[in-house]
Image: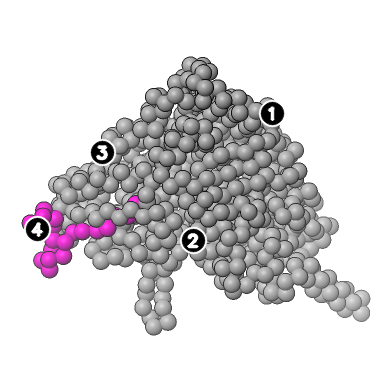
Amino acid sequence: MKTLFALLAACLALTSAYAETYRDPRAAEFYQQHPEFFRFAQPSDLPKDLDWKDGSEQPEFADPRAVRGGTLHQMIITTPPTLRRVGANANNGFRADLYENNDLGLLGSHPNTDEPIPGIALRWALSKDGLTAYFQLDPKARFTDGQPVTADDFFYSFYFFRSPWADADWYADFYTKEFGGITRYDDHTIAVHAPRLRPRQLEWLGDLRPTPREFFKDFGPDYLKRYNDRQQPTTGAYYVPADGFRRNHSVTLQRVKHWWAEERRFYRHRFNPDAIQHLVIREMDNAYESLMAGELDFMLIGLPRFWYGANEKPAYQLGYLTKVQFYNDIPRPPYGLYINTQKPGLDDRNVRIGLQHATDFQRVIDGFYRGDFERLNQFSEGLGQYTDPSIRARRYSPELARAAFAKAGYTQIGSDGILKDAAGRRLSFRLTFDTTDRRKMLATLIESARRCGVEYVPETLEHTTMYRKVMEKNHDICFWAWSVSSRVPAFWESHHSDNALEKLPDGRRVPKRQTNNITGIDNPELSKLIDEFRVATKEEDMIRLSFRIQNIMHEDADFIPGWRVPGYRVGHWNWVKFPESFDVRGGDEPLTYGLYWLDPAEREKTLADFRAGLKRGEPKSVVHDKHRVN
């Protein structure tokens, strides 16, 4: 009888636990349907032999001189198509400012040492078998709408991202296959389980982020429309207020008053401005002039004509504006041309190889970028031991290009010099760029390709319009780059067949829209190796598979490597203050880690003196090369 009563009590407790996860019955039902994944326990059930860590041995990296206050004036070339975190058009260039750089997971990664540091979790421990990580959450943690962060918000992440309403195939796959389950011990203690052993297990499990249940109380089939212009609350220091999103004008991020983590080690002295205003300036030349007039506080000026041109500007000559070259050590974004292999003509590998030899990126680097950039050799570069250093970008060669095109049947030369095949089909493809300064290199690429018998038909589109076109897979060839956040390669989203094609009810296979596989590459052997890489448990196996995958990607020639940038260049007015080291090893631009601060009073005095033509000091250009990688 006692056993029966105990069983009934346990069932009632479990039902109560499910209900407590959130009053949305659909979420509770989802947890009940997957009891092997969503587990409930008591604090007394925690293993007694856990070795808890808190990251206290890691050095702080922010400057204690930093002060809070002021508004930073920045620029963006267009407002984002949506403020949603996921779903159609969410993977845009502004998302990092809204989420990745403005949110905390369970753990963070120290930007200089790559070691784990506290995030929402104050302490953590890894089980002896390496398959479970335990986390004790900071009870002070809050979302930007003031709602407390609890274990239930981490449960809700799995419900949200795996829901078809989120329209997020990559997240649905990731939150299904890359986690083995989650256990709730109390409001502020959880365990996250891995599906297998793998290197850097804490990096995988500790990156889990909570999803605000209160905000998504109306989550349903109309998610994409209902939440399109609303930023999801985060655990970060900034949020977009109700009047902060002005389409085609600006996006303003407001700092949370009394942010819950502002006195925490690793977060104090960071994220200092009261507001960050991103003004829409569609032409880089106009933005540059706004910087030189003091209307923008700082700006990335990586283009040589801006970097060197600043030397002639009064703001620099009179000592008000400082130029900084900062060398970082990060995985390199793959800048280059992405070939849509699902388009006629481009489905032939020989044509794609020919295009690689017909595209003279070295000439662009030497001329347009004055040799300041470096040639990228492959899609997965800067990933340390996971990058195969033997892979080299195919060199520009009209002879090799024409030989490859001949293998594809393009042997006849038209009256305009463009190759064509026996059926009269011309070797002509649309080359899509956005309207940023990069479009000015189109003439070089077009001319170099024409020497090889190829016609690149230029198409320049406003940034958001181009983004939508590419994500709908309507392009031939586009200039693009993906951000890279981890030194462990992520091949599935960009090169797996799952993201290339989808099967319609009538049996037809069509390009799958809104995925990162924008080349449409569909190689069964490659997909098989990617699957093996994802489930590999030993680092040596992952390295071996990574090398093989990279070589097949090189052979498939769906990506024409462009360039890599060894750091970043920025021009800033001297009322913007930085640490002595300027930034951290993993910083890809000043906003990423929020180490800078403002002096609003100095801003007013500086602008008054500048407009009066007074000299403040000598021109100043600084190089920080501590983290330079040769």
Q: Which residue is mark 3?
A: 363
Work out whether residue 95 or residue 348 is closer to the camera in this orientation and state it. Answer: 95
Q: Which residue is farthest bottom?
A: 506
Q: Is residue 156 above or below residue 268?
A: below
Q: Position of residue 65 (x, y in %)?
A: 68, 27
Q: Is residue 428 magenta?
A: yes
Q: Is residue 278 in view?
A: yes
How far apart are labels 3 and 2 at the CA level?
33 Å
Residue sitting at the far right: 2
Magenta stretch, residue numbers: 415-433
Q: Earlier in the sequence, mark 1 or mark 2?
A: 1
Residue at mark 3 to residue at mark 4: CA–CA distance: 26 Å
* SS at badge 4: loop
- The three-letter code of the residue at mark 3 reads Arg
The image quarter in which residue 61 lies? top right
- Circles 4 and 2, Cβ within 8 Å, touching? The answer is no
Q: Which residue is mark 2?
A: 89
Q: Which residue is mark 4?
A: 414
Residue 588, position in %: x, y? 50, 39
Count of numbered circles in the view: 4
Q: Is residue 235 left or right of residue 473?
A: right
Q: Distance between the Cα atoms at labels 4 and 1?
A: 68 Å
Left or right: 629 as drawn, with respect to 157: left
Identify the image quadrant of residue 339.
bottom left
Q: Reading the chain from its start, which is encountered first: label 3 or label 2?
A: 2
In the rendered view, does 473 fall on the left or right side of 291?
left
Mark 3 or 4 closer to N-term?
A: 3
Q: What is the CA distance from the residue labelled 1 to the residue labelled 2?
A: 39 Å
